[in-house]
Amino acid sequence: MTGTVAVVGSSVAGVRTAQALRTEEHGGPVVLIGAEAGLPYDKPPLSKQFLAGTWGADRITLLTEAAARAAGIELRLGVPAQHLDVAGREVLLADGHRVSYDHVVIATGSAARPSPWPVASGVHVLRTLDDSRALRADLERPGPVVVVGGGFIGAEVAATARASGHAVTVVDPLPAPIGRLLGPEIGELMGQVHQRHGVDTRLGVGVQDITGEAGNLMVTLTDGRQVEAATVVVGIGAIPTTGWLAESGLLVDNGVVCDEYCRAVERDDVWAVGDVARWDHPRLGEAVRVEHWTNAVEQAACVAFNLTHSGQLRGYAPTEYVWSDQYDWKIQIVGQPRAAVKHRFIGEPGAEPPRFAVVYSDGDSRLAGALAVNWPKALVACRRLLAVGASSDEAAKLVETLLVPTVA
Amino acid sequence: MPRLTADVELCQGYGNCTTTASDVYDVDDDGKVVLLRQIIDDADRSRVEEATRSCPVNALRVLDR
């Protein structure tokens, strides 16, 4: 394949696809199209180091102009794609320009679910660099912070705001927000990380309304209680960015629907990667969409391979992996703990800092997934065993041996 | 042949490298990356480069000697 590949979307999925195409020795032009004007950047630090002000924008750049030039990647930044002409093989940009392609990779990611509470100022979502800058500016002023949504983004923002001295309250309608991923018992244990660090939680209760303005907001909960805030952060999920594909004729249903090779159904020249892709997972036997950094990178590598090896396509069957850094907890989750029927706890949650793992078992006593807190070695061990279909007993035994450090 | 470096100060133990190239990268008891080999064959280069790009903190390099 020596034709032009247009990659639409300049976050990690798009950038890594463009780079991996060169690794796979694609010889034709690669055009990377991005809606935002600045250089491509990495998102995980936006709720942590960048938000805290310890890292600048240069530290989170994913692709410099020099690196793009060296790799032969043409950057078309600052203009969003508006339409995909599948029959004519063209991407139409919002400024009227067209980019012709032989293959197109859709990597437009997802956008923060907007706050449903209309307030003039002081209520933030967090997805983009500009979002993080705006929130950072508000956090530079004193005053209490309310975080709506106790998922990973919300928890990370709460930890960052707490570390910079704010009183912080986390609100979530679920009694154990991380329980969606880890089961109710472990989810409740994980929720205690907030109280341990002096963050108030209002769990099992929703937000009725938010009124006021930046510096003087009132959050009314569904149980009638009220919480004052100078700043509110709403972290209630993300929505795949597929609006620009509405007239394309592609099948879009909670993401771009793809086959197991990450090709849009019934097209052999349209691919999708990252948050926006909903593909047929060969091992799980269902269509899935995954909003994690590692998935974006692994899927980018798979699509770049498939695009350049049309005779030997590889089904994309990743082992799901996500991490989150909150306070002094490094949380790592692999596989599908939510699909497990039982679990085994290994390590010391009470230690300072805590170090423990949870090994999850499916109905056939196979390893279904694992959680590690401050214990990367245990996580890596379970991640490898998951990939080979090991039993949960084998995983638990191996993790137990890791409790005793090896002598160098 | 390509030479490898790993910055253990940057490393956060995310472990993605150990999935893509388990013959090259491991993590130690402290959760820091360990290079199992310093030099790789040219034939392994693209796979190891893929592993370096899977590092969330950009701690890994493949250098021409």
Image (tube, helix red, strand yellow):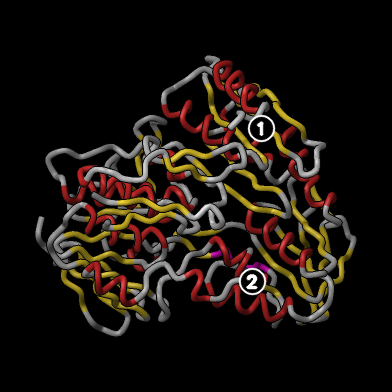
Gap in angstroms between the C-alphas marked 2 and 1 = 30 Å
The label shown at residue A54 is 2
Residue A190 in the image: x percent, y percent?
A: 74, 42
Chain that bears disc 1:
A
Determine if residue A264 is in view: no
Quarter containing the N terminus of chain A: bottom left
Instruction: Pick out the residue farthest to the left.
Output: A2
Question: Which span of residues is magenta-colored?
Answer: A112-116
Residue B32 in the image: x percent, y percent?
A: 55, 45
Q: Residue at x 54, y 59 (%)?
A: A238
| Residue A404 inside the magenta-drawn segment | no
Determine if residue A42 is in view: yes
Q: Residues within 10 Å of mark 1 (few under 14, many from 20)?
A: many
Q: Earlier in the sequence, mark 2 or mark 1?
A: 2
Q: For residue A338, which quarter of the picture?
A: top right
For this rendering, which residue is in front, B31 or A106?
B31
Q: Secondary structure at mark 1?
A: strand
For this rendering, which residue is in front, B42 or A162?
B42
Chain that bears disc 2:
A
Quarter containing the C terminus of chain A: top right
| Camera-side mark, 2 or 1 | 2
**Is A248 placed above or below A299 here?**
below
Amino acid under disc 1: Ala
Which residue does the numbered mark 1 point to in the structure image?
A: A357
**Is A139 placed above or below A199 here?**
below
The label shown at residue A313 is none
Q: Residue at x 74, y 70 (%)?
A: A232
Residue A273 in the image: x percent, y percent?
A: 35, 53
- Name the chief secondary structure element in magenta: loop
Amino acid under disc 2: Thr
